[in-house]
Amino acid sequence: FTIYDFVDAYHHFLDPEWDGEPLEPEPVEPKEMSTPKEPKDKEPGSNDGEEKEKWTRLKIKLRDGKEREIQHMINTSFWSADGKPISAEEFLQNLFGKLPEFFKNEDELRKIWSNPATRSTFLKSLEEAGYGKDELVNIQRLINAEKSDLFDVLEYVSFAIKPITREERVINAKPIIFFKLDDKQKKFLDFVLSKYIETGATIC
């Protein structure tokens, strides 16, 4: 900050015996500029400061005797309905045992999922059973199906039917959906389907 002396108060502080003669400034020897070192290239797969999830591919056999392939996320924790930490395999086993309470076969699941009202009721019931939005997203990641619809995820867990991506589903359905539509309707539906490919069906 700056002090303004309007009354020449600095004269009261002048003391030659105390201050002495002003000192000559000491010469400063110039120093050589050091050349900055080039950063070393990081080795492939090296940690860049951010903790990345490590993946290991596992095959697990559920109680129906069929195998499911999962990408076990080492840094992701799974919890039972009573709040205890469990393995990814136990997590899927528990879900596999719970889903038959809501549907008995693929057709019944498809019927529930195709209607927004019954889908919403079903998802709320799943959440009450300990499988809410976060858990469903974890399941998607667990089976490497983030580009698939949650319908495919539940179908895979229940019936070991390999998931297809949302884009594949749209491509397969377009000839049927677009049949007898005019250009304006097709353009609008293209927009809706593109959003479905990006985000999937609403799960909240």
Image (cartoon, rainbow, N blue to C red):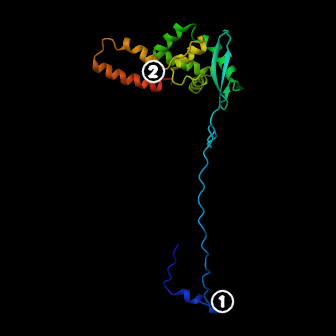
The type of residue carrying mark 1 is Trp
Q: Could you tell me if residue 101 is visible in this image?
A: no
- The x, y position of residue 62, in whole percent, is 67, 13
**Dot 1: within a 10 Å radius of its alpha carbon, few (fewer than 14), some, or many (20 or more) residues?**
few
The secondary element bearing badge 1 is classed as helix
Q: Is residue 59 above or below residue 20?
A: above
Q: Residue at x 55, y 89 (%)?
A: 11
Q: Secondary structure at mark 2?
A: helix
Q: Image quarter for residue 32?
A: bottom right
Q: Position of 10 compared to 63: left or right?
A: left
Q: Nearer the viewer, residue 171 or 139?
A: 171
Q: How many marks?
A: 2
Quarter-of-image position of residue 17: bottom right
Q: Which residue is mark 1?
A: 18
Q: Position of residue 127 (x, y in %)?
A: 58, 22
Among the two numbered marks 1 and 2 on one chain, the one whose residue lies closer to the N terminus: 1
Dot 2 corresponds to which residue? 167
